[in-house]
Amino acid sequence: SLEEKLVNQFLQQKVDGILMSLANDTSQYKHLENILANDTVLVLFDKVAKLMNCSKVFVDDKDGGFKATEHLIKKGCTKIAHFRGGLNPQNSIDRYLGYREALSVNKISFDPNKVLITSSGSIEQGYILAKKLYESGIEIDGLFCITDMVALGAIRFFKEQKIDIPNEISVIGFSNTMVGNLVYPSLSTIDQKASKIGAEAVRLFLSEEKMLKTENRLENQSLVLKTTLIKRESTQRI
């Protein structure tokens, strides 16, 4: 993969360390083990391999997925779909598990037909999945999307069908990207504090690098950041 090639290239260049967010389809971690075997600092952020023995910074995606789904439930939704990411990235798995847990806690039965997998997390994918769900005849009144972009694509399709957002279908995304506040209706979302993830990843990186040079050892730290629910028009039912 391109990810593996880049890691090998960096190791040949004898870099001090690597800051890395894993690709969506990464499922083998030999290249990450090679980094650590070379006594090179490795800090994973956002999309991480939880079992890797290195420092990591990521948000509590499961809790974020739970908050998003429970917000829809509190707004009166009982038929909630989820457009999830692929089966590999940890953040996709955790957001899905949060969705499942919120349904379970609130005594809403899980319907696998209401879960569709997006291949890219793009606006186009959101549109395509919303169309697929609509044409399947499955009724929904709420939708939790893996990213804001997917949510915006879904809203675009629903609006074309003259479906009232949020009163017929409430939609919530994940990421809190800037564009979510510029569209109509503005998009409810989960803020994953991207700039804080970046800042903390760099702080851990510099700390690890210093320790490796002064004490010839690495001290792995995992930092899990809390998410915040951002309520906007796409879930504010009348």
Image (cartoon, grey):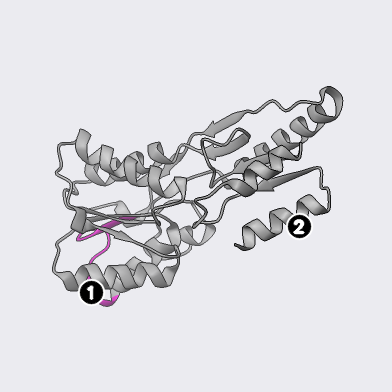
Few, some or many C-alpha atoms within 10 Å of disc 2 (few <14, some 14-19, many ≥20)?
Answer: few
Q: Residue at x 33, y 39 (%)?
A: 66
Determine the secondary structure under disc 1.
loop
State the image coordinates of residue 187 (x, y, percent, origin top left).
Answer: 40, 57
Instruction: Tell me if 15 is positioned left or right of 100 in this view.
Output: right
Q: What residue did someone put label 2 on?
A: 9
Per the model, the C-alpha gap separating discs 2 and 1 is 52 Å
Q: Report whether 3 appears left or right of 15.
A: left
Q: Dot 1 corresponds to which residue?
A: 162
Q: Position of residue 43 (x, y in %)?
A: 66, 40
Q: Is residue 171 magenta?
A: yes
Amino acid residing under circle 2: Gln
Image height check: is 86 above or below 197?
Answer: below
Q: Which is nearer the eye, 222 or 197?
A: 222
For mark 1, does the 10 Å Cα neighbourhood hold few (<14), some (14 to 19), or many (20 or more) residues?
few
Q: Position of residue 154 (x, y in %)?
A: 33, 67
**Amino acid type of disc 1?**
Lys
**Residue at 79%, 26% in the rendered image:** 211
Residue name at image x 60 percent, y 36 percent = 56
Q: Earlier in the sequence, mark 2 or mark 1?
A: 2
Which residue is more in the foreground, 182 or 78? 78
Residue 176 position, x and y percent, is 49, 52
The quarter of the picture where residue 165 lies is: bottom left
Badge 2 element: helix
Q: Which residue sits furthest right?
A: 214
Bounds of the magenta segment? 160-172
Using residue 19 as the reference point, say whether residue 173 is left or right of it: left
Dominant SS type (magenta):
loop
Residue 202 visible in image: no
